[in-house]
Image (cartoon, rainbow, N blue to C red):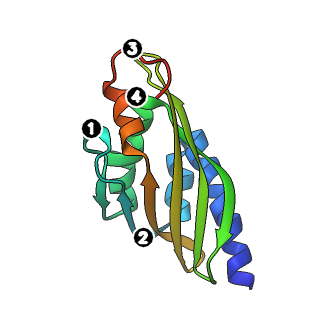
Protein backbone atom coordinates (compact mmCIF):
# COMPACT_ATOMS: atom_id res chain seq x y z
CA UNK A 1 0.00 0.00 0.00
CA UNK A 2 2.93 2.37 0.65
CA UNK A 3 4.01 2.08 -3.00
CA UNK A 4 0.51 2.92 -4.23
CA UNK A 5 0.32 5.96 -1.93
CA UNK A 6 3.77 7.15 -3.04
CA UNK A 7 2.81 6.65 -6.69
CA UNK A 8 -0.19 8.92 -6.20
CA UNK A 9 2.07 11.64 -4.78
CA UNK A 10 4.45 11.22 -7.74
CA UNK A 11 1.47 11.39 -10.12
CA UNK A 12 0.23 14.65 -8.60
CA UNK A 13 3.74 16.13 -8.82
CA UNK A 14 3.95 14.95 -12.45
CA UNK A 15 0.80 16.83 -13.47
CA UNK A 16 1.96 19.93 -11.59
CA UNK A 17 5.29 19.77 -13.48
CA UNK A 18 3.47 19.41 -16.81
CA UNK A 19 1.24 22.39 -15.98
CA UNK A 20 4.33 24.46 -15.16
CA UNK A 21 6.29 23.16 -18.20
CA UNK A 22 9.06 22.31 -15.71
CA UNK A 23 11.46 20.07 -17.64
CA UNK A 24 13.81 19.58 -14.70
CA UNK A 25 11.02 18.40 -12.39
CA UNK A 26 9.71 16.08 -15.11
CA UNK A 27 13.14 14.48 -15.56
CA UNK A 28 13.34 13.90 -11.79
CA UNK A 29 9.94 12.17 -11.77
CA UNK A 30 10.55 9.93 -14.80
CA UNK A 31 12.47 6.65 -14.62
CA UNK A 32 15.63 6.51 -16.79
CA UNK A 33 13.97 3.77 -18.86
CA UNK A 34 10.80 5.87 -19.38
CA UNK A 35 8.69 4.77 -22.36
CA UNK A 36 5.64 6.61 -23.71
CA UNK A 37 3.00 5.87 -26.34
CA UNK A 38 0.95 8.83 -27.53
CA UNK A 39 -2.27 8.39 -29.50
CA UNK A 40 -1.72 7.73 -33.19
CA UNK A 41 -3.09 10.42 -35.48
CA UNK A 42 -2.10 13.42 -33.38
CA UNK A 43 -1.05 16.37 -35.56
CA UNK A 44 2.55 17.38 -36.23
CA UNK A 45 3.66 13.74 -35.87
CA UNK A 46 3.24 13.88 -32.10
CA UNK A 47 1.57 10.45 -31.91
CA UNK A 48 3.73 7.37 -31.54
CA UNK A 49 6.43 5.92 -29.33
CA UNK A 50 8.97 7.83 -27.26
CA UNK A 51 11.80 5.77 -25.80
CA UNK A 52 13.34 8.04 -23.14
CA UNK A 53 12.31 10.95 -20.94
CA UNK A 54 14.53 13.30 -22.97
CA UNK A 55 12.94 12.06 -26.20
CA UNK A 56 9.47 12.76 -24.77
CA UNK A 57 10.51 16.27 -23.75
CA UNK A 58 12.29 17.12 -27.01
CA UNK A 59 9.90 15.62 -29.56
CA UNK A 60 6.64 15.42 -27.59
CA UNK A 61 5.84 17.70 -24.69
CA UNK A 62 8.13 20.55 -25.76
CA UNK A 63 6.69 20.97 -29.28
CA UNK A 64 3.12 20.43 -28.03
CA UNK A 65 3.54 23.17 -25.45
CA UNK A 66 5.16 25.53 -27.97
CA UNK A 67 2.29 25.11 -30.46
CA UNK A 68 -0.72 24.66 -28.18
CA UNK A 69 0.21 25.81 -24.71
CA UNK A 70 -1.90 22.87 -23.60
CA UNK A 71 -1.82 21.00 -20.34
CA UNK A 72 -3.54 17.90 -19.02
CA UNK A 73 -5.98 18.66 -16.22
CA UNK A 74 -6.55 15.49 -14.17
CA UNK A 75 -10.05 14.87 -12.86
CA UNK A 76 -9.84 11.34 -11.45
CA UNK A 77 -7.09 8.97 -10.31
CA UNK A 78 -7.76 5.23 -10.43
CA UNK A 79 -5.20 3.01 -8.69
CA UNK A 80 -4.79 -0.28 -10.53
CA UNK A 81 -2.54 -2.24 -8.22
CA UNK A 82 0.78 -1.21 -6.67
CA UNK A 83 2.47 -0.12 -9.91
CA UNK A 84 -0.21 1.43 -12.12
CA UNK A 85 -2.51 4.45 -12.01
CA UNK A 86 -5.06 5.46 -14.64
CA UNK A 87 -5.69 9.19 -14.78
CA UNK A 88 -8.81 10.59 -16.44
CA UNK A 89 -9.07 14.25 -17.37
CA UNK A 90 -9.11 16.88 -20.09
CA UNK A 91 -6.46 18.59 -22.16
CA UNK A 92 -6.98 22.33 -22.10
CA UNK A 93 -5.03 24.87 -24.07
CA UNK A 94 -4.98 27.47 -26.77
CA UNK A 95 -3.21 27.38 -30.11
CA UNK A 96 -0.56 30.06 -29.71
CA UNK A 97 -0.88 31.36 -33.31
CA UNK A 98 -4.61 31.06 -34.09
CA UNK A 99 -6.09 31.33 -30.60
CA UNK A 100 -8.27 28.23 -31.13
CA UNK A 101 -9.05 26.43 -27.88
CA UNK A 102 -8.21 22.77 -27.32
CA UNK A 103 -10.57 20.80 -25.09
CA UNK A 104 -10.15 17.03 -25.36
CA UNK A 105 -10.64 14.20 -22.89
CA UNK A 106 -7.78 11.87 -22.05
CA UNK A 107 -6.92 8.72 -20.20
CA UNK A 108 -3.31 8.20 -19.15
CA UNK A 109 -2.10 4.81 -17.97
CA UNK A 110 0.97 5.42 -15.83
CA UNK A 111 3.34 2.63 -14.84
CA UNK A 112 5.80 2.94 -11.95
CA UNK A 113 9.14 1.48 -10.92
CA UNK A 114 11.33 2.49 -8.01
CA UNK A 115 9.14 5.44 -7.05
CA UNK A 116 9.26 7.02 -10.51
CA UNK A 117 7.05 6.97 -13.60
CA UNK A 118 8.34 4.31 -15.95
CA UNK A 119 5.68 4.44 -18.67
CA UNK A 120 2.82 6.50 -19.99
CA UNK A 121 0.16 5.43 -22.44
CA UNK A 122 -2.07 8.23 -23.70
CA UNK A 123 -5.58 7.78 -25.05
CA UNK A 124 -7.21 10.95 -26.39
CA UNK A 125 -9.40 12.25 -29.21
CA UNK A 126 -6.83 12.89 -31.94
CA UNK A 127 -9.48 14.49 -34.20
CA UNK A 128 -9.98 17.32 -31.70
CA UNK A 129 -6.21 17.89 -31.63
CA UNK A 130 -6.02 17.92 -35.45
CA UNK A 131 -8.97 20.32 -35.66
CA UNK A 132 -7.26 22.67 -33.22
CA UNK A 133 -3.92 22.63 -35.03
CA UNK A 134 -5.14 22.46 -38.63
CA UNK A 135 -8.75 23.65 -38.44
CA UNK A 136 -10.01 26.73 -40.19
CA UNK A 137 -11.89 29.17 -38.07
CA UNK A 138 -13.48 27.06 -35.32
CA UNK A 139 -13.08 28.78 -31.95
CA UNK A 140 -13.04 25.57 -29.89
CA UNK A 141 -11.89 22.14 -30.93
Q: Position of residue 123 (x, y in %)?
A: 44, 56
Measured Cα–Cα span from mark 3 to mark 1? 19 Å
The reply to whether the C-beta atoms of the residues labelled 3 and 2 are less than 8 Å apart is no
Nearest the eye: 42 or 120: 42
Q: Is residue 88 above or below residue 59?
A: below
Callout 1 secondary element: helix
Measured Cα–Cα span from mark 4 to mark 1? 12 Å
**Residue at the spot of label 2:** 32
Q: Is residue 132 above or below residue 97?
A: below
Is residue 81 found left or right of 101 in the rendered image? right
Numbered tag placed on residue 44 in the rendering: 1
Which tag is nearer the camera, tag 4 or tag 2?
A: 4
**Residue at the spot of label 4:** 132
Q: Residue at x 60, y 70 (%)?
A: 85
Which tag is nearer the camera, tag 1 or tag 2?
A: 1
Is residue 76 found left or right of 117 in the rendered image? right
- N-term-proximal mark, 3 vs 1: 1
Q: Position of residue 83 (x, y in %)?
A: 58, 80
Measured Cα–Cα span from mark 1 to mark 2? 26 Å
**Residue at the spot of label 3:** 137
Callout 4 secondary element: helix
Callout 2 secondary element: strand
Measured Cα–Cα span from mark 3 to mark 2? 42 Å
Amino acid sequence: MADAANNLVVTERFYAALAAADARALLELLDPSFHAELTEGLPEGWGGVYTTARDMLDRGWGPIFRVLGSRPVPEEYLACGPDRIVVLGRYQGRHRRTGRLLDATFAHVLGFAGGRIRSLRQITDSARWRDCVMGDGEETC
